[in-house]
Amino acid sequence: MDTKIAEISNMLIEPRMVYILERKLRRSKFGPYKPKTTAEIEQSLKQLFEAEGMSEIAISGVKRMTGGASKEQFLFQLQHSGLDGPQGYVLRMDPLEGIVETCRLREAELLRALAGSFPVPEILTVDAEGDLLGSPGLITGFVSGVTKPTSLEGQSVSGIGSSYGHYAELIAPQFLNILVKLHSWQGWRNAALPNYVIPKGNTAEAALYQVNLWAQTWRQDCVEPVPMVTLTEQWLRENAPVCEEPCLVHCDYRVGNFMFEEPSGEITTILDWELAHFGDFHEDLAWILQKLFGTWNAQGQFLVCGLMEREKFISEYQRLSGREIKPDVLRYYEVLNAWKCAVMDLSSAIIAGQRANNHQDLLITWLGSAGAVFLDQIEMLLREELPNAA
């Protein structure tokens, strides 16, 4: 590896994320996980809203939401003196440990910056350190819509493997247009995003920020050595591509992470911004193109996120964005994304399950076995990249 790249590689991690990983280590000792009662959630919310200056507060209808291996999520109704009637909100709280560690403060900053330009949930408030909620948490407005057609059976909770039926032709253009708009968004230049770092253009920083973050996660949560994880980290460092102009990337933009209205098919919101950062647009594309998130139509053609054929997705993205998708850079981020998933499954998920520090203990235990799928994907990608490898 080039000496200069090695020096950059060893120091690049966003400071806020260094803090978040260190905080996770401290919080992991507070386990095991104990589910909060409805009364406890109501009391925590009331304390938070009182601290925000609200009065005549009434909280009702607290209901745990399904899914969410990385965050605990609750629906509730809020009434206070400043509202004409009860309104619905969503509480997202950090478990002691999960499959991925992210920051509610960063998420709130970004959603506030995106409001008005993108379909995102409205931010009510954030308890960045969990001083009043008991765990770091974020409260957003409730957005109507569905993540999968209600008329189709056999759909998964996560949305993975979902089919959209006739809605696909309505949703696909919106899905693509929002992504293109996101990658060209310049509002960040005047936005208050103090807990984000923008990688320098025309350098490999965009890639190396991510390699360093996930390498640190692996070292922190490692259960046992996995040679393929170590080999892949080395390959990622040695082959980190230059990113000419970093942009905002969602990093979990896929099936199941947007909502739409029935019967219009109009997208009402994009969900799960917790992994978003500034990086290379190829990183988002490589994530979206994963076969894990797609389906096959009756003709045996693979549909990206169940919406459109891969070739059409790539050509339309290039046409709408004016960007050129570089196959070698796309391949790099396919490897990076598979490696990230392997790290999540083979370290963070397993360690959270072992310590009983997560509300989804069965799911995260199962995810530990899914790590092998991503190791196999990495091997396939690297063998295609290095056809003469033994």
Image (cartoon, grey):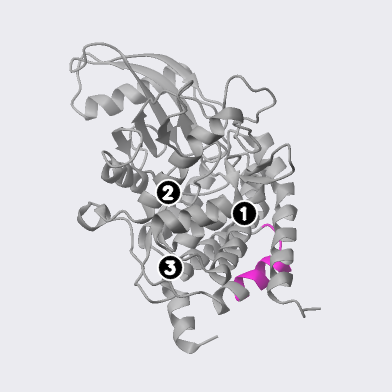
Q: Earlier in the sequence, mark 3 or mark 2?
A: 2
The count of marks equals 3
Name the front one of labels 3 and 2: 2
Q: Examine the rendering and report whether any part of residue 21 can be seen.
A: no
Residue 90 screen position, x and y as percent: 40, 27
164 versus 177 height, above or below: above
Describe residue 196's horizontal placement relative to residue 175 as left or right: left
175 versus 51 height, above or below: below
Name the front one of labels 1 and 2: 2
Q: Crowding at label 3, few (<14), some or many (≥20) Cα neighbours within 10 Å?
A: many
Q: Examine the rendering and report whether any part of residue 47 can be seen.
A: yes
Residue 93 screen position, x and y as percent: 44, 35
Q: Which residues are magenta?
A: 223-234
Q: Which residue is mark 2?
A: 179
Q: Pick the quarter of the image with the N terminus.
A: bottom right
Going by the numbered disc 3, the residue's amino acid type is Ala
Q: Tell me whether the residue at label 3 lies in contact with that at label 2, contact meaning CB atoms closer than 8 angstroms.
A: no
Instruction: Determine the secondary structure under disc 2.
Output: helix
Going by the numbered disc 2, the residue's amino acid type is Leu
- On whether residue 229 falls in the magenta region, the answer is yes
Characterize the magenta stretch by its predominant secondary structure.
helix
Q: Which residue is mark 3?
A: 206
Question: Which residue is at a point 48% across and 20% down the rendered structure image?
Answer: 263
Going by the numbered disc 1, the residue's amino acid type is Cys
Instruction: Determine the secondary structure under disc 3.
Output: helix
277 versus 226 height, above or below: above
Q: Which residue is mark 1?
A: 341
Find the distance from the CA under tag 1 to the CA under tag 3.
18 Å
Question: Which residue is at a point 49% across and 46% down the rendered structure image?
Answer: 253
Q: Residue pushed farthest bottom?
A: 3
Q: Which one is nearer the viewer's eye here, 261 or 287?
A: 261
